[in-house]
Amino acid sequence: MVVKDMMPNFELFQPTQVKDALAILDSYGKDAWKMAGGYDSLVWFKERIKRPKAVIDLSGIAEMQGIKETADGVEIGALTTLTDIENNSIIKTKYRLLADAVAKVASPQIRHAGTIGGNASQDARCLYYRYGLPCYRAGGTTCYADTPEGINREHALFESDRCVAVTPSDGAPALVALDAKYVLRSSSGERVVGSEEFYVGPKIDITHMTSTKPEEILVAIRIPNTWAGSHFYFEKVADRNVWDFALVNVAAALKVQNGVIRESRIACGGVSAVPRRLTAVEEILKGQPMNETVAKLAGNSATRGARPLNYNGFKIPLMANLVTRAVRDAKA
Amino acid sequence: MSTPDITRPDPAPTGRVLRHKLIDRIYHWLMALSVLILMATAFLPILGWKFEWLDLHWITGVVLTLAVLFHIIRAVCWQDIWAMFLGGQDLRDITGGGKPGKYTPAQKLYHLGVSLLILAAIGTGLLMLLKIDTPWWRRDPYWFSDTQWGVIYAIHGFGAMALITMVMIHIYFALRPDEWRLTRSMFRGWMTSKEYLDHHDPKRWKAKEDA
Amino acid sequence: MQLFRHANSIYGGSDVIIGASYDLLLWFAAAGAAFILMHAVFKAVTKTGERASH
Ligand SMILES: Cc1cc2nc3c(=O)[nH]c(=O)nc-3n(C[C@H](O)[C@H](O)[C@H](O)COP(=O)(O)OP(=O)(O)OC[C@H]3O[C@@H](n4cnc5c(N)ncnc54)[C@H](O)[C@@H]3O)c2cc1C
Ligand code: SF4
């Protein structure tokens, strides 16, 4: 029997500087694990499914904490907790979408320690994978969720490729809608990528949810001014109201002038491996009045191309309704 | 029109003999392209170059399968299939240094090796198609147990990785100046009568003049 | 270096083979390079290139 619910041995590092953390990453390579709040990581370890040789606890790195206003917007340290984001006055006044989204994560306890970097980087929650089956995402050669008998109620409607797991994050769709940029640092330099590059689907990399390389650390997330003070809407539907992952969530930012939608950015979570940006819907909405008819049109367009699995067909009307509500009810 | 006898002892040194028909050259280059695409789509992502590789990989695999099927049927029904098989005469050639027929023993051995590797990769690759949705079937991994799939994937992997060695060797010989006549014949179909008589035994390979 | 990729069996204890190990990639490439090098050196030393009937 595999011993579960008991932490295996690993070497623990607790650096206080990014450069020290990077040096440890360089020396351990793929055998190192970056840990922030630990709410995703510790479960993997306890279940003995992921067995890193070295764990780098980033939580002591002051440089990666806090929220500061910049000339172009706001920079959120990757270690900033979800509670701090939820309560931050800049975020609440200018980027309320993100505050609304992180407020829906899990439970107060988890939000107190869980970080925005970890929330955006967290792994898939597919039960087969989490149970430790050697599926594609675990480096194996089979998907157990998408078989004639597979239970795939929580799984993807779009863009699946062998793996049909979805992004479980509530923060990520809001970050996509706000056009966030991700600052990734390694010992050879820094790169800043947009959401379309940061989140990766199984077609590109079936064993990772983000393009963060093993030698890189996500140090901060930058949100540009572009969408500050827009009309926002976030809604999440889960089986339970707290302590549960989204079946589908929607995050929308709309620039509305005299009741007409000038521009929008809308993303849904829980429907594909990456937060799904609804570019076709955004195109449709340009120059349209913000009313029920247009909202319905947006909802119906959002699900075009969906390919339901055996048990997740219900997500199609759910997603359509959430997008309809987002376009109809977004508020400044 | 009379066909000159190019197997006679002193053929015109400027004459050409046909080594590969157009159809066989097309097959060869289609296969080469397929194998290179298959190797690139298989190994580059493993080496860290991330891109959408799967569709290109399996579609190319199906193209290669059809090409190999065509080649086998053509070799059995229309070509001298024994020209590519190793036999006792080849062993005597190696030890005695006699001139070969159309193919040298080394070429036959190479062909045998590559054939086995490609057939192994194709056979296991076709089984892997059971794991993707097509218009004809829904994917279903339970055709085989995990252990059986492990063996299928291992054969596919070993076959594909061994092809790296074989392809490297093949390209090396194709680029060697002393083998250029063979490379040229794979592009243009012919070799000169002099090359033919220098390197081959006309009794064992009765070549036709290049039209 | 490993010959195979393994995964933990979900039933515990034993592990299952899930494919050939990618560690071998470089070894196969190295084998090709070694053959090429040896052949090229052999040909250069024996100067049999011109009449090679490979
Ligand atoms: C019971 C439960 C319920 C939950 N419900 C929800 C929910 O409703 N909505 C939701 O969105 N999430 C939910 N979660 C997930 C939780 O929000 C996230 O796991 C948490 O925010 C992750 O943050 P962390 O700092 O604890 O991450 P960690 O566990 O420390 O890290 C998570 C992953 O991100 C990587 N990582 C972390 N920080 C960095 C960094 N700076 N650079 C590079 N890589 C990094 C780690 O290597 C790891 O792979 C739930 C989790 C639990 C346990
Ligand atoms: S959906 Fe993805 S994570 Fe889940 S079993 Fe299939 S391959 Fe694994």
Image (spheres, coloured by chain):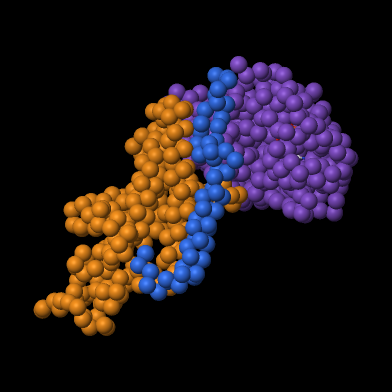
Give the color of chain C as drawn.
blue
- Tell me if residue A254 comes above or below residue C8 in the rendering: below
The quadrant the C terminus of chain A occupies is: top right
Q: Position of residue A101 (x, y in %)?
A: 73, 33
Q: Residue at x 22, y 65 (%)?
A: B205
The quadrant the N terminus of chain A occupies is: top right
Image quarter for residue C13?
top right
Give the color of chain A as drawn.
purple
Q: Residue at x 60, y 49 (%)?
A: B48
**Horizontal arrangement in the rendering, residue A11 relative to residue B206 (left or right):** right
Give the color of chain B as drawn.
orange
Q: Camera-side residue: B60 or A145?
A: B60
- In the image as oriented, which residue stretches furthest toward the front? B96
Q: Camera-side residue: B52 or B160?
A: B160
Q: Position of residue B128 (x, y in %)?
A: 41, 38
Q: Is residue B56 visible?
A: no
- Tell me if residue B57 comes above or below residue A140 in the rendering: below
Image quarter for residue B8?
bottom left
Q: Camera-side residue: B61 or A52?
A: A52
**Horizontal arrangement in the rendering, residue A283 relative to residue A219 (left or right):** left
Image quarter for residue B107?
bottom left
Q: Position of residue A198 (x, y in %)?
A: 67, 46
- In the image as oriented, which residue stretches furthest toward the left? B1
- Tell me if residue A290 comes above or below residue A110 in the rendering: below
